[in-house]
Amino acid sequence: MHPKLIQRFARWHIWLGWAIAVPLVMWTLSGLVMVARPIEQVRGEHLRLPVEEQALPADARIAVSLEGSAKPVRTVSTQVERGDTITRLTYLDGSSDRFRADGSKMGPVTDVEARLLVAERIAGGDAIASVTRFEADEPPFDFRRALPTWQVALEDGTHVYVGIESGEIEAVRTRFWRVFDLMWGLHIMDLEAREDTSHPVLILFAGLALMGTLLGTALLFRRRRARPVS
């Protein structure tokens, strides 16, 4: 390789190194944090207590008609909860309704019911610090789903989200989940929504990092001048 070309490559490599140093450190650090724990622990699955499933009684009544539904139905499920047969309709827009065995519609989940559900199904769920209601159009940042929920905040910093319509635990957000979420935002360079994995800034710095790596590799194989034998 020509010496002038080598010098030019070396100069470009130095400048690119300065340009991509911060993103490379950020990508490495965020990647290390994100793999520090199994994804099941990040999602709080280890905090969910096992729930014993009960078979539907042979004489169970499921009196729900889809003809009267005002919205398109995606799924219908029926199960026994605390001795009662409950049927859930989940609609295409993500909302849901609950019905009793006689077909009567159940009301929204109250904060008391949310507390009881968390205490029953989450390890340490009886140590509750606060309960806050969030509407579908203003979800908290660590939930980011357009569903009305109760945020049951535990004393250890865990946030358990109970669906007001579904009556189910929609998500568990531990303190480490929030750290993981921040690292994910840094990793994809999208701290606002933390969803866009293909945007100009990320593509630009990824391209510069690749270019710097290729230049560094080329410099490794540059031809060295033979040293005179003394």
Image (tube, grey):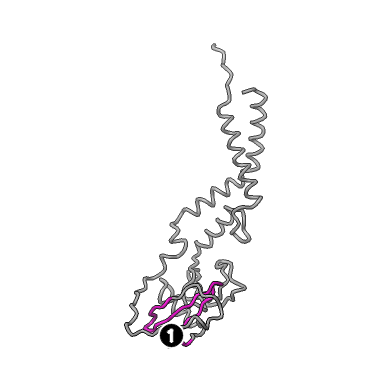
Determine the residue located farthest toward the top in the rendered image. Answer: 230
Left or right: where 41 falls relative to 203: left
Where 175 sits versus 75, above or below? above
- Residue projecting furthest to the left: 58
Q: What residue is disc 1 on?
A: 63
**Which quarter of the rendering shows the C terminus?**
top right
Is residue 80 part of the magenta span, yes or no?
A: yes
Q: Residue 51: give x, y in percent of width and height.
A: 37, 73
The residue nearer to you, when weighing 154 against 107, is 107
Q: Position of residue 81 (x, y in %)?
A: 39, 80
* Element at label 1: loop
Residue range in magenta is: 77-104
Tell me which residue sits at (49%, 86%) in the image.
105
Q: How many marks?
A: 1
Identify which residue is drawn at 41% across, 69% down. Answer: 48
| Frontmost residue, 135 versus 227 | 135
Q: Amino acid at mark 1?
A: Ala
Mark 1, other Cα within 10 Å: few <14 / some 14–19 / many ≥20: few
What residue appears at the point 52 percent right and 58 percent down from the top-left corner? 180
Residue 170 falls within the magenta-colored stretch:
no
Relative image position of residue 94 (x, y in whole percent): 54, 72
When the figure is inspected, residue 9 is found, relative to residue 51, above or below; the finding is: above
List the single residue furthest toward the front.
Answer: 67
State the residue in front, 60 or 84. Answer: 60
Quadrant where the N terminus lies? Answer: top right
| SS majority, magenta | strand
On the image, the x and y values in percent for residue 209 come to 60, 42
